[in-house]
Image (spheres, helix red, strand yellow):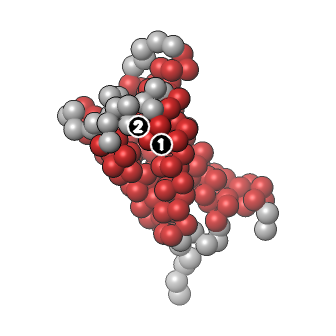
Amino acid sequence: MSFPTRLRRHGKKALLLGIVNAALLSAVMVPVFQAGLSPMPRPPSLAFAEMLFARALPLPVGLLFHLVYVTLWSAVFVAAAYPRLTFLRALLLGLALWIAALVVFFPIVGWGLLGLSIGPRLLLASLVPHLLFAVFLWILCRLAFRTPTI
């Protein structure tokens, strides 16, 4: 079965799974930022939105960007990996997205390669949400695509 066929077949479930994944990640990360525990100057999705619009924006705009990003990658994962929705595949996607954030996204928002213009703690601070992304994605896939037992 091809990627577009899998996406059409499981698209609604994949989109819902992505929305739930984004909500779970936000439920963990927003309090971390609000408590000042993250070494990141602001949430990365908000930093990206502010860079695009060249002005300060409220947190809900960043959350919307986050929702779209996580939903997109969750749906791509389902369409690309189905029916082998394993933890290892989810982890590899999470790690690939983390590396992309370090070498593409962070320099775009002005945090430097690997986020080092902010500080080395950004390496670990940005790894944690990507690991959570993988764990949540895998658990949600297990729930959404479980086969009925007799």
Residue at (42, 14) in percent of width and height: 56
- Separation of residues labelled 1 and 2 (CA atoms): 6 Å
Residue type at the position of mark 2? Gly
The answer, for residue 109, to whether it is visible in the render is yes
Residue at (43, 17) in percent of width and height: 57
Quadrant of the rendered image containing residue 59: top left
Which label is found at residue 102? 1
Residue at (53, 87) in percent of width and height: 150
Answer with left or right where residue 75 lies relative to residue 140: right
Q: Residue 114: x percent and y percent?
A: 44, 41
Quadrant of the rendered image containing residue 85: bottom right
Residue situated in front as seen by the camera: 2 or 14: 2
Which label is found at residue 90? none
SS under mark 1: helix
Do the numbered discs 1 and 2 sit on residues whose CB atoms are within 8 Å? yes
Residue situated in front as seen by the camera: 150 or 33: 33
> If you read the primary sequence from the N terminus, does the residue marked by circle 1 or circle 2 appear first?
1
Instruction: Pick the quarter of the image with the N terminus.
Output: bottom right
